[in-house]
Amino acid sequence: MSRLHVKKEDQVFVLSGKDRGKTGRVVKVFPASGKVLVENVNVLKKHIRPNPAKNIQGGILPEAAPIPLSKVQVICKECSEHARVGFKTHEDGKKVRVCKKCGAELD
Ligand SMILES: [Zn+2]
């Protein structure tokens, strides 16, 4: 059972790095490496070599690269702030994430 604070489709806030202060949608979470892929964040310019045999044109393609999970915080839907996430277990055993700022459930 994972206790990751970020899930796919979350809106997250970037805390550090070159995209500090940006927000974006989580495209994918990589639990094994502790990383997260966020739309339009940590975009690298990937150089593509032309390969006429495969009909590939050369050029520079922007491509987002995963960043460490510790660099992002979920944006709470209730208070619209980026916040640390806590965990709460319901009586039926369901685990949910809660916003540490306003206490709202995020799942
Ligand atoms: Zn909140």
Image (spheres, rainbow, N blue to C red):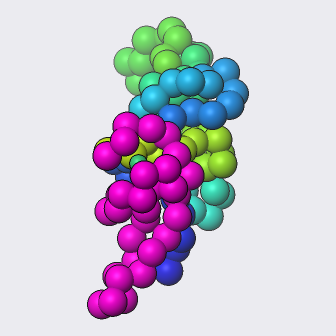
**In front here: 100 or 7?**
100
Q: Residue 95, relative to residue 99: is it above or below? A: below
Name the spot of residue 17 as percent of width and height, x first: 69, 27
**In front here: 69 or 63?**
69
Q: Reply yes or no: does residue 84 show up in magenta.
A: yes
**Residue 6 in view in this figure:** no
Q: Residue furthest right?
A: 17
Report the span colored magenta.
Answer: 78-107
Q: Reply yes or no: does residue 40 show up in magenta.
A: no
Q: Residue furthest bottom?
A: 92
Q: Residue 50, relative to residue 3: is it above or below? A: above
State the residue at coordinates (58%, 17%): 45
State the residue at coordinates (36%, 57%): 104
**In front here: 30 or 85?**
85
Name the spot of residue 83 as percent of width and height, x first: 52, 46
**Residue 82 in view in this figure:** yes
30 displayed left or right of 34? left
State the residue at coordinates (68%, 31%): 16
**In front here: 7 or 60?**
7
Q: Residue 87, relative to residue 48: is it above or below? A: below
Quarter of the C terminus within the rendering:
bottom left
State the residue at coordinates (65%, 57%): 33
Judged by its main secondary structure, the magenta piece is: loop
Q: How many marks?
A: 0
Name the spot of residue 59 as percent of width and height, x first: 51, 9
Q: Quadrant of residue 18?
A: top right
